[in-house]
Image (spheres, helix red, strand yellow):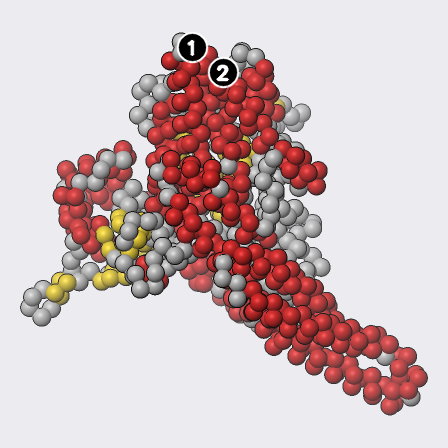
Amino acid sequence: MPRLRFDSVKAAYAKKAVEVAEQGRPSEYFGEMVFNKTAMFKYLPQDVYRKMVDVMDNGAMLDASILDAVAQGMKAWAMDHGATHYTHWFSPLTGSTAEKHDAFIEHDGKGGVVEDFSGKLLAQQEPDASSFPNGGIRSTFEARGYSAWDPTSPAFVMNNTLCIPTVFISYTGEALDYKAPLLKAISAVDKAAADVCRYFDKSVRKCRCYLGWEQEYFLVDRDLYMARPDLVATGRTLMGHESPKNQQLDDHYFGSIPKRVAAFMRDLEIEAMKLGIPAKTCHNEVAPNQFELAPIYEECNLAIDHNMVLMSLMKDVARRHGFVVLLHEKPFKGVNGSGKHCNWSLGTDSGVPLYSPGKTDKDNLRFITFVVNTLAAIYRHNGLLKASVMSATNAHRLGANEAPPAIISSFLGTNISEVLDHMENTDNLVRILSKHELRLDIPAIPELMIDNTDRNRTSPFAFTGNRFEFRAVGAEANCSPAMIALNTAVAEQLVLFKQEVDALIAEGEIKEDAIVKVLRKYIRYSKPVRFDGNGYSEEWKQEAARRGLDCETSAPLVYDRYLDKESIDMFAKMGVMRENELVARNEIKWETYTKKIQIEARVLGDLAMNHVVPIATRYQSVLLDNVIKMETVLGDDEGRRLSEENIKKIKEIAERVSEINRLVAKLIDTRKQANRIESEREKAVAYHDRIAPMLEEIRRHLDKLELVVDDETWTLPKYRELLFNC
């Protein structure tokens, strides 16, 4: 392809790397754009401040009488930080966020306006519910929906707008977002965990759910991105032969960060910290131009809001640096895709982590109790957990040799596995090693303290020392569906566990004996979900099927797990979602899957017929002209002998163009047939089974033509440009 001029662009951004303003220490500007407790203390009356802290820290009911005072203080703070508008910021079932901006103005009665913001406007607004996916809960003409303030997630100022985190519900009360069921799931697991914790510490009043996500992403030069219609429209390259060099030398992971990227990362970290996102870690990931950012863990609801803010912020900051952020799980074929590892844990209100071993038998029994019940929940609902992370985009990543397989299992490590195996067969507790020493025969290196478990990167749900790491979540996904399913499943399991223990105690069993007896039952029950081996192997897929784990890989069929009787009963019993809400969400999942593949099919057809085929036939004409001239000058036999390679190329181009024409026509016809299917589920299945494979078949011919056509003639940026221009 004709080379784009990068030198002046790179020089400009290299200069910007030096010009990134020094902001001082992070502790000095962290959270300055957040209406946090520090801001509340300054801008709210003392009694109002105390009530707000009680709501945020203890889950107290919000006193409606303080709404106007909170709104006035929030408005004053926001305007002092440059805000001119406010918005209810929510997460509809599109997977992204939504916001409608209103100015801080009302009529003053004299023909002018005054800046105003009431408690009523803070607490509730009415976005158009019919314009968002609702799965049939609301008809097109039934537009009323409500957004309601979530005071547990602080408001923040972004782009001169006060953003107020909210839930989004229909006129009839069904959740139309991710936050409403998330808050219910968190509440359910907090209560269930606290009830179990009181077996070991009667002073526990409440438990908290924590999340630390790790966000992977790709950066590509904006000029190159704009020259790839597939990247612009779908977020991934629908064609493109792999670069001669990609990640095979393992030289990018944890490597030196390019200066232009480092400037972007520094800028992003500063902006993130101002918004209260505790950005901690950044580094090169495995694939070229792939990177990662990870924060310090936070309370689950806040962590998810922060991740949604960050994904939006990344795009804005990247634009300033001449980049585009790619969050698609598999933007480039042949190199690692991107995930969002979710480090999940529970802790008590006194700060005791429930997934950390202790120094006493009682502490260790509590630790084992929560590990075993989590394993039981994962085993009982392993298909649902997979459904919570499955999507048309993440399906490209799951099961590849870079990410967890599309089978939910849990890695525990040797030490914890031995503890559970021992406990399964004896009443005695064994000693759990929190860490052990490792001595290196290098005098200058001190002894290392090694965790009680190694890591297994092939495990979708691995125990990593004091938490479980749910590694199957996709990079562009909202973490909420995974956390809703996980927290609800664990809450249900803890409730079942407590009922069984209480029943044994009522029959006269000693409490500790009752706990151990029930734990031994669940250790045996959950054993099929424990796997410490290579999750990538074919042997594991066969073994997992024998164990009864869900091995389905078709996204539309995986979604069925939401509507299993066990799932419907669980969500209803825990008060998280009703059956009609689950049915509606599945309708949206199937419809979204279909639309994603449909868009990809249209884009690939356009690329093939309006870009590649004309380019290939134009080059074919050049080759034909060369062959004819060679025969004219040198004679038919000699000219044809010297043109053999060109003749081979001419024939290959002709054959591949013919196949592309045939396949694209077939693709269009197949799509038309699938579009006539009324059932969203069956339509999604048809797109998965019949249309998605055709995209790969067409791609194979396009990628081969990329190798045949002269580089100067090829107009689309190739992988070597896209992956090595930072």
Q: Nearer the viewer, residue 451 or 120?
A: 120
> Which of the numbered marks, if any, corresponds to residue 51?
none
Q: Residue at x 15, y 58 (%)?
A: 116
Answer few, some or many: residues within 10 Å of disc 2's Cα (few below 14, many 20 plus, some between 14 and 19): some
The image quarter containing residue 614 is: bottom right
Residue 439's quadrant in the figure? top right
Residue named by callout 2: 517
Q: Mark 1–mark 2 contact, CB under 8 Å? A: yes
SS at mark 1 in the image: loop
Where 602 sits versus 386, above or below? below
Please indicate whether residue 12 sits to the left or right of residue 348 in the image. Answer: right
Q: Kindly identify the residue that appears in the image at 47 percent across and 56 percent down.
A: 264
Where residue 581 appears, x then y in whole percent? 38, 48
Mark 2 lies on a secondary structure that is helix
Residue 449 seen anywhere in this rendered image of the structure: no
Task: Report how far apart the C-alphas of labels 1 and 2 lie in the structure.
Answer: 10 Å
Residue at screen point 68% across, 60% down? 242
Q: How many numbered marks does the figure carry?
A: 2
Which image quadrant: the C terminus?
bottom right
Q: Residue at x 19, y 43 (%)?
A: 42
**Closer-to-camera residue (681/652):** 681
Q: Earlier in the sequence, mark 1 or mark 2?
A: 1
Of residues 623 and 500, the one drawn nearer to the viewer in this rendering: 500
Place of residue 266 in the rendered image (x, y in percent of width and height, measured from the top left): 45, 52
Assess disc 1: are there few (<14), some (14-19) or many (≥20) residues with their C-alpha within 10 Å of its C-alpha.
Answer: some
Q: Please state which amino acid type lies under the numbered disc 1.
A: Glu
Where 328 sits versus 429, above or below?
Answer: below
